[in-house]
Image: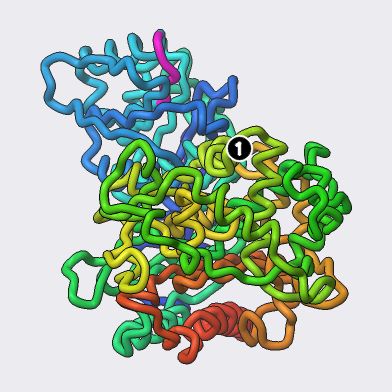
Amino acid sequence: MKIQIQKLNILIKASFILLIFILGGFKFVKENKTWNTDLPKKSVSYFNSLLFNNGSQIIPFKNLADLKIVSINLGSAYSVEFDAMLRNYADMKSLDFRNLPYLHIPDQYNTLIIQVTSEALTQRKNIDFILAAEKLHTVVVAGFGNQAALSALDSLRSPVIWNQHEIAATAEFTAQIIFGGETVQGHLTDSISVRFNKGAGYKTDQTRLRYTHPEESGISTLKLNKIDDIVNEAIREHATPSAVVMVIKDGNVIFNKAYGLHTYDGVIPTKVDDIYDLASVTKVAATTMAAMKLYDEQKLDLNAGLGTYLEDVKNTNKENISVKDVLLHQAGFVNLDFYSYLKPLDHQPDSSNLYSVKLSEHYFLRNNYYQDVMWRKMLSSSLPTRGRYVYSDISMYMMKEVIEHQTQQPLDQYVLKEFYSSLGMRTAGFNPIKRFNKNQIVPTEQDNYFRNTLLQGYVQDPGACMANGVAGHAGLFASANDLAILNQMLLNGGTYGGVEYIKPETVKLFTSSQSNVSRRGLGFDRGNGTGYPSTSASAESYGHTGYTGTCVWVDPKEKLIYIFLSNRVYPSASNKLNSMRVRPRIQDAIYEAIAGSKTDFAKAE
């Protein structure tokens, strides 16, 4: 009788909490039927997800660079949704072992995420497979269905996440728990077996991005629909053939949409995980990240002259230019059109021992052109605006040289090792054509003035391509999700996934105002609070734009990240994206949605 009363109390409490969730979303019923349908599913997922055997705190995952993950399905009907959510956090392989007579443990992976159902655990071969796997690998079991099936895993020592409901929402929810996007708080209310007894269950904290609905951040889905109108207008007016827009509020991904086709006359629809040429966003997403890390390690003195780090700069007019002035674009550097210096003998259509720098499919630059021509031009260039703010790519060419000298590693390898791989950024990197299927990379430009070819997977910027695709000012490619991860780390004060990448005081230093003559931070562009980058962006905002039609802006005041990716220079450079104010209009629409939803909530109260 006592147990029955306890069950009844728990049921009443859960029903009451669920009712609060439903009533909280009631006013959105007329605005968005999808949210109203999904809300109870999300609530059910939350209150019934349980985590066991996590004494070693394997969940949520840490140090992703060390994990070679495979997701193995032994019975779930929603493995596609489950695996798709996993890929928001890390690179992984999917294997479907349902209905196989013999189950083989893959040796090339060190981390196995095994999806099971209560029905699957009635088969002895599945249980034996799981028990054998944990002897050789890190194993996490993601289970769905009747909790009584947990008794089949009594001898398992690996983490088990269990949800009684087998639907797409719980599959996605469970996948997020594994990486710390969602939290788990529940415990067993009744004993099932020796290991899974009453009260069992571990709690976790959110350590990574959560993928959810706008309403979880108090924003109406309907109020964000204005973004669709702006982007679709841009595509109709040929301001860009494609775009991806992503919005993160309070650590929650609340908007993530792809628009258009890769090209105006193409057939490939844009996807949210497509890879774009980020252009000058490289400055903050690669070069400045590296500079911050070196500053943390006391390997970079902001007040030191360039000659302190670069032997070639000594005895030139750049020897005493401080690193700080370089990062602020106050060094006086001029802009140089490097491809205008090319001579016929500098390139040829086929590769050879002397021409190995590949700029496109049929354009190969002679070896050492960067050192022999480009670097020498930079060293001998004048400094007509020393001390004034003049935006120049030469600043980040210089910073790349400093970083590579201090790390003794190429810039692309350093940021991949120190940031991208560990953070779970699956696409971010230079020269993506070497690593990804071409159809996943959005074409950037039909180059009719230099390489005379379609640029797809080769950096659009002429100087960066002549530097073998790796430069401090351009060359980085990535998906919107990767930029979301990187910038959430900054918004968190340098920590993500339970790992500190940059000290919080360093993040504060680099992203705050550091100039008496401009709005700039160290490497970062900043909002001025009076209309840039948008009317509503606060003066605390920091980020950067890119020539190819990209931008990322972080507003600490609102705990907001806005990402816009496009290929506005396809087929050739057009100023329509700028003249139509597409990027700032979208940004303002986001702030309007936030403000409007706050007003709605206030009225509801």
Q: Compared with residue 346, is residue 525 higher up or lower down, i.e. above or below?
A: below
- In the image, 470 versus 383, the foreground residue is 383
The image quadrant where one finds the C terminus is bottom right
Does the magenta stretch mainly form a helix, a strand or a loop? strand
Q: Residue at x 64, y 87 (%)?
A: 535
Q: Position of residue 255 (x, y in %)?
A: 45, 67
Query: Closest to the observer: 505 or 126?
Result: 505
Q: Is residue 455 visible in the rendered structure shown here?
A: yes
Q: How many marks?
A: 1
Return the residue at label 1: 418
Residue 8 percent coordinates (x, y): 48, 44
Residue 142 in the figure: left or right of residue 98:
right
Highlighted range, magenta: 136-140
Q: Residue at x 39, y 76 (%)?
A: 568
Q: Amino acid at mark 1?
A: Glu
The image position of residue 315, as x and y in percent, is 82, 51
Residue visible at 49% across and 50% down in the picture: 369
Q: Is residue 41 visible?
A: no
Q: What percent of the width, then of the height, locates residue 518? A: 79, 77
- From this view, report whether residue 477 is shown above or below residue 267: above
Q: 491 or 260, which lies in front?
A: 260
SS at badge 1? helix
